[in-house]
Amino acid sequence: MELVAGSACCMIVYRYDMSVMSLRGILLTVVLMILSLTDLHGWISPDRLQIAGCVIFLATALLLPDPIQRIFGGLFLGLILGGGMLLVSLVFDKLTGKESLGGGDIKLFFMTGLYLNSAWERLFYLIWSCLLGLGCAALRRSQRLPFGPSIAAACFIMTLYGNVITRWYTGLF
């Protein structure tokens, strides 16, 4: 994990140089790694880590240009992402009679949704998290697995390369 954390921090600094975005990315990555390990070990996403992620978002948003717009935009789209996933989860649970997403996963979608910049990034984030979750399930040959690490990995990918991926995709049209 130390090697993964060090590599992730180097990738963030390489991408954003020495900036507030690097600080934000490193702090978010540390929170996501702790949350992922906790979810893998104990099947729980602690609220205090979710709150830490929200505080990091708010504190670093104040240091960036247009802080009020960033904060309200992040909150609005984070609520849409978290609320949308809650709605999908409730409908799926009702139709199948099985639990699909835990409450921690839904809160994690909200918290990580704060950091993404556009609706396209959120769409690709959902796709990445689902693909990573399915890939992990196939590797572990398990019907049930914690989804937090897949959400965290997708968030890491999108915070680093979200704008590159969306520019590439929207440039196809």
Image: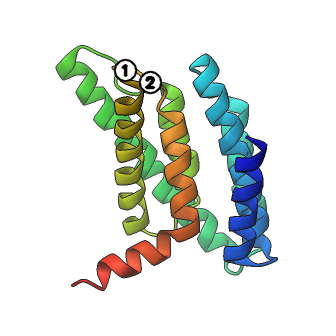
Q: Amino acid at mark 2?
A: Leu
Residue at the outermost left position: 95
Mark 2 touches mark 1? (CB < 8 Å): yes
Looking at the image, which is closer to me, 164 or 98? 164
Q: Amino acid at mark 1?
A: Ser
What residue do we see at 72% from left, 57% from top? 7
What residue do we see at 49% from left, 26% from top? 146
| Quadrant assignment, res 11 | bottom right
The image position of residue 150, as x and y in percent, is: 48, 41
According to the image, label 1 marks what residue?
142
What residue do we see at 43% from left, 65% from top? 121
The image position of residue 6, as x and y in percent, is: 77, 54
The CA distance from mark 2 to mark 1 is: 7 Å
> Judging from the image, what secondary structure is the residue with disc 2 in?
loop
According to the image, label 2 marks what residue?
145
10 Å neighbourhood of mark 1: few (<14), some, or many (≥20)? Answer: few
Q: Which is in the foreground here, disc 2 or disc 1?
A: 1
Report whether 59 appears left or right of 102: right
Looking at the image, which is closer to me, 149 or 119? 149
Q: Is residue 72 above or below residue 92?
A: below
> Judging from the image, what secondary structure is the residue with disc 1 in?
loop
